[in-house]
Image (tube, helix red, strand yellow):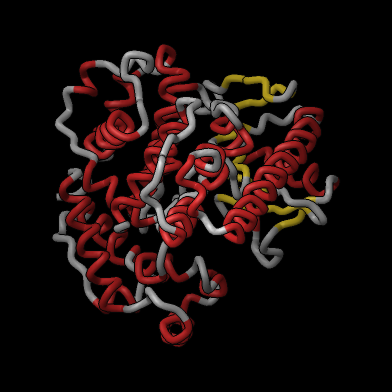
Amino acid sequence: MGKRAISEKMLEALRCFLNGKKVTWEEGLSAEDWQTLFRLCQHHQILPMIYDTVYACPAFGTCPPETVQMIKTQVIRQVMMQSRKTEEFLQLYKKLLEQNLTPVVVKGLICRALYREPDYRCSGDEDVLIPKEQFKGCSEVFAANGMEMLEPDMNPDEEGEVPFYKVGGMLHIELHKELFSSESEAYGNLNSLFEGVFDRKIQEEIHGVPVYTMCHTDHLLYLILHAFKHFLHSGFGIRQVCDIVIYAEAHGAEIDWAYLLEKCREIHADVFTASLFDIGKKELSFDPEKACYPEIWSSIEADGSDLLEDLLEGGVFGDSSMSRKHSSNITLQAVTEDKKGKKAGASLIQSLFPDRKYMERTYTYLKKYPFLLPAAWASRIRNYLKESKNMGGNDAMESIEIGNHRVDLMKKYKIIQ
């Protein structure tokens, strides 16, 4: 079975999961097809959802017993880990509330609660947005409850987001003072769309715990722009589209769709967003009526087919290959150049020698010693060559090819000129 056919099988199974159904495949998948399908599901971090939907169908008999056991073990482990992480997070969250702090939870926990089986929608970490003045108080509560900074050499006062992990536990938290890196020339301006977000916050109850989150319009906008940000890098996966359409269906009546369109148009993300909903309608049973999806949105000419192909190829964070990850130098540069009124292009130079802000993510010493940028470039190229030797899918020319193709996609969806 070809690559596209396997992707269609995954989408069919995902659609069934979202609708509370099981697939009824009689035949047509070989042992190798099953292994390819499950690998694709891992790339998109939806393995528990798909396994739950397919394991009882007649065609599953062709899946080798050792593969069945391996996948079943992975699914049980992922679901149990997610359940434990959710419990650890809620226990910690209650401690924050006790100190009169107002941490606003976004994405993971809030989205999971909307799924038929919340723990089947696994999250690597939890994202928490706080007013800057509450960072110190949150950090103190974290420290008192066994949370440590993932990067102890980081100066948290200078960072827009600080990752923490639970010592001896499974919980990881991204503590945000801002939703997007303000240092990014490509998308740092997105933070301005969330001014006053704390004044509009709401509370939802999850497992008996009151949890602050963004109002529904802000939250849907953030889910969209989080996918948008990853699209500007190296891509995003089908799970993000699921989150968006499920959230829209659950809270559509309370969402200010006109405001959403206005904000998306400001940043040239309106066609991109309409294309996400086009994918939702065609592949994920998105119900526009249930979501109160208005004519002002449905009238936008949008075809999500090329976007769907890109996200299926990219995996959950566009990290399906090193070549693809490295291509983000090209796409981010294209967006930055477009903002300056210049024509987007791609070159080997951009791929191997990105600007200092990009390099600072890996070579953090550049923040303190920017003059060491040439040394960091040399180190990057050494690592690049080592990765190319040790694994497939990491080639400079392939990065340029992927980058050029994705720049063309950005033009198609009117993100850049």
Which quarter of the figure has residue 183?
bottom left
Of the pair 107 and 8, the residue shown nearer to us: 8
* Residue 195 in the image, given as x and y percentages of width and height: 45, 31
Q: Is residue 101 above or below residue 29?
A: above
Quick check: can you spot residue 140?
A: yes
Locate residue 24: give its quadrant: top left
Is residue 395 found left or right of 385 in the rendered image? left
Q: Residue at x 24, y 60 (%)?
A: 334
Image coords of residue 371 (percent x, y): 46, 80
User: x and y percent of residue 354 in the render?
Assistant: 36, 72
Decide: is 394 above or below 248. below
Q: Is residue 325 left or right of residue 266?
A: right
The answer to which image quadrant residue 346 occupies is: bottom left
The mark total stands at: 0
Residue 304's place in the image compared with 369, above or below, is above
Of 59 and 218, nearer the camera is 59
Instruction: Say which residue appears at 66% left-offset and 43% top-offset.
Output: 79
Q: Determine the residue located farthest toward the right in the rendered image.
A: 144
**Residue 196 in sight in this render:** no
Q: Position of residue 87 (x, y in %)?
A: 76, 37
Closest to the observer: 20 or 228? 20
Q: Residue at x 38, y 36 (%)?
A: 224
Residue at 56% x, 27% y is: 116
Query: Quick one: 417 or 37, which is closer to the camera?
Result: 37
Left or right? Give the position of 80 relative to 411.
right
Work out which quarter of the rendered image holds the N terminus and state it: bottom left
